[in-house]
Image (cartoon, rainbow, N blue to C red):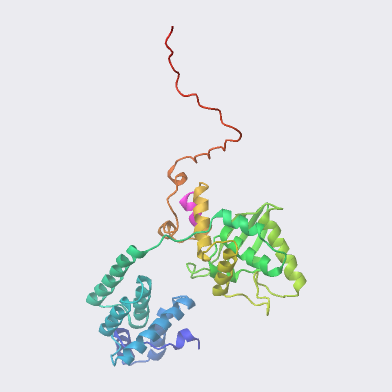
Amino acid sequence: MSRVETQEVEQGRKLKFLEEIAEYGGPVDFNQLTHVLRTVSRKSKAINTIKAYDRENHVRRKWLSANHLPLDEKTTILYLAHRFLTTGSGSLAKIASAFQMANGTFSVLESQMVSDMIRAKRREEIATRQQPKMVELESIQKLFESLSDDPKSERDTLIVVLSFFALLRASETAELKWEDIKFSKNRLEVRIRSAKNDQLGLGRSTFVECPEGGDLDCLIKRWRVRVSLSGITSEFLFPSFQKGDKLSANTISSIARRRLEMIGVSATHHALRRGSANELQAKGLTLEQIKAKGRWRSGGGLMRYLQDNPMAQGLSEVPEEKEVTGEAEEDDGPPVLEKEV
């Protein structure tokens, strides 16, 4: 049995409900049916979500045990108040969701208290929130210009520039295989097999302008030759140099951060996605077009990435002032009236 199927439900209304159902008699196999009910809430979620919730529940149980408290709604509210002092609103929401996966929904009073804590923490965060960083197209051009003739430089640069142009998350970059990229008429199709907002794994394609002989085109072809000559046999676009297996999302993020630092840019991998979205907006793409290209599920999610831009508000781009070369003509000032003699 998989981990999803064997995880037990802890104390709470859900467990009590399942125990009451199991007491019914008759020809029906209630053990099998209650097993379905025990596991269905976990099977409905992505594996990474389940792992994150399991970690939160483990930490919560450990704290409750250390303080000799039972596992129930009221003590979970106490635990949330404890975490409120040291953690952010996102973590509080994850703790609450993890509890509900194992126990069912909070009662009305407890639910209101959870919502109040999350909202209060968000208001606190507004005062200290910094403007998210984003990588600009100019920095991507610097990466091409600083490319070295060695496999690490080629791989790491391609990780960054492809993540920028295809608006890739680190997890999506790590999963890319050679068969996921296809050239056609000066365009590159990047196939994302699954994403965090694609729980059913239907897959999406993002199309990138890639003129033949351009920087991106040459780098991809150069990397393909480099891999073939190295003897690395891997289906993944970005394999490790040691074993040829795929890089983790955390490794992809670290590589991107280090490569950007080499050109004097301090930013995370996700700043590539943010910067690319704003670059597309400046070029005049509509919100729907950017949402489709970046595979955002909702317009609200995309709007958190975008900064105010005059072109996006219907204003034309102001041309840069031309630099004046040579000596400027001397200004004689206003005309002077001379008295006739």
In the image: residue 301, left or right of residue 177: left
Residue depicted at x 53% and y 47%: 283
Residue at 57% x, 67% y is 256
Taking depth in this image into account, of 133 and 81 the one nearest to the observer is 133
The quadrant of the rendering that contains the C terminus is top left
| Residue 109, above or below 312 | below
In percent of width and height, residue 12 lies at 30, 86
Q: Is residue 301 visible?
A: yes
Residue at 56%, 31% in the rendered image? 328
Q: Residue furthest right?
A: 229
Residue 116 x, y percent position in the rendering: 26, 70
Task: Give the vertical position of 175 relative to 263 (above or below).
Answer: below
Figure check: 222 above or below 249: above
* Side of 54 where 329 appears, left or right: right
Horizontal side, residue 205 vs residue 86: left or right:
right
The residue lying furthest to the top in this view is 341
* Range covered by the magenta-colored residues: 285-291
Estimate the x, y position of residue 271 in percent, counting from the top left: 50, 62
Observer-nearest of 191 and 59: 59
Main SS of the magenta part reads helix
Residue plotted at (41% across, 87% down): 35
Percent x, y of residue 316: 48, 39
Q: Quadrant of residue 93?
A: bottom left
